[in-house]
Each structure stands twice: as C-alpha cells, then as structure tokens.
Image (cartoon, grey):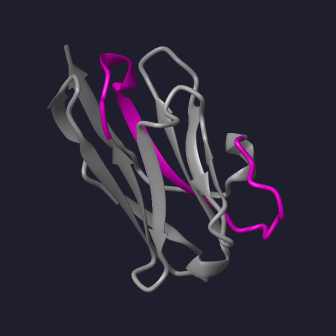
Amino acid sequence: QVQLVESGGGLVQAGGSLRLSCAASGGTFIRYTMAWFRQAPGKEREFVAAVSWRIFTLYAPSVKGRFTISRDNAKNTVYLQMNSLKPEDTAVYYCAADTSLRVAVTTTPDDYDYWGQGTQVTVSS
C-alpha cells in the first residue's frame, strides 16, 4: 500500500511561482513512475507532468516550459516547480503513482493506481 501526501499549494498572483511536493510512503518509490494531474471545477482530471524511474520526463503542452517535475529518491518525494503561473492553472493538483513498472510513461489517469488527497492552487489575475 502506497500513501501519497501533497503539500505546497496556495494562492499566488499571475506570473508567480509555487512548488508542490508529494511525499510517498509504503512502497518502493524508486521503481515507480510519478505524476501530477490537476482538476479544475467542472472539468475532467488532466495530466500535467510525469517522471519515470529512469528520470524520463513528460509534460502537457499547456505547461511545458513553465513547469518542472523532479524526484528525490532518497527522500521518496516528487516535486512540481510551477513558474509563470496563469489563472487557467487554477485547480486541485493531485500526485499519482504508477506502480506497474510499465516501460512507457502514461498520461491516462486510470493507469495510476495510487493518488494523494490533492492540494489547491489558485492563481489570481
């Protein structure tokens, strides 16, 4: 059983930055693909970024060049550095783990089997 706990959300003005953290416990973190998803009110959950156990990274086009995903395997933690934030980035951000050991990094929520509780990010204009 893997537990994921996100932190670092908050209110920020457009153009500002935030760093989200997701601490994992109860599993073999180093072997998992870790990802961030987000869900805005009235919208479906969408892929933001992922990092594989081989440190391959993948980003949604809407955040590429502004967001950076990274992982610290010694701390069992994955981060999402968010710069140049826009009001449309406002959402609840979720950390997720794919423990299947699949080779390819997936952007499909159903492929991730553990989720955190989410952290709110609000960007004011």
Residue sitting farthest toward the front:
65
Q: Which one is nearer the viewer's eye here, 70 or 42?
A: 70
- Is residue 85 magenta-colored? yes
Q: Is residue 84 left or right of residue 56?
A: left
Q: Residue at x 56, y 45 (%)?
A: 49
Q: Is residue 12 left or right of residue 66?
A: left
Q: Which one is nearer the viewer's eye here, 55 or 8?
A: 55
Give coordinates of residue 79: x percent, y percent: 40, 59
As drawn, 65 above or below 49: above
Which stretch did the figure color magenta?
83-107
Q: Is residue 43 left or right of residue 117?
A: right
The quarter of the image holding the C terminus is top left
Q: Residue at x 56, y 55 (%)?
A: 96
Give coordinates of residue 3: x percent, y percent: 48, 69
Give coordinates of residue 95: x percent, y percent: 48, 53
Number of marks: 0
The quarter of the image holding the N terminus is bottom right
Q: Which one is nearer the viewer's eye here, 109 or 68?
A: 68
Q: Residue at x 35, y 50 (%)?
A: 81
Q: Residue at x 38, y 26 (%)?
A: 89
Q: Quadrant of residue 86?
A: top left
Q: Which one is nearer the viewer's eye here, 50 or 109?
A: 50
Give coordinates of residue 104: x percent, y percent: 81, 57
- Is residue 55 magenta-colored? no
As drawn, 124 above or below 103: above
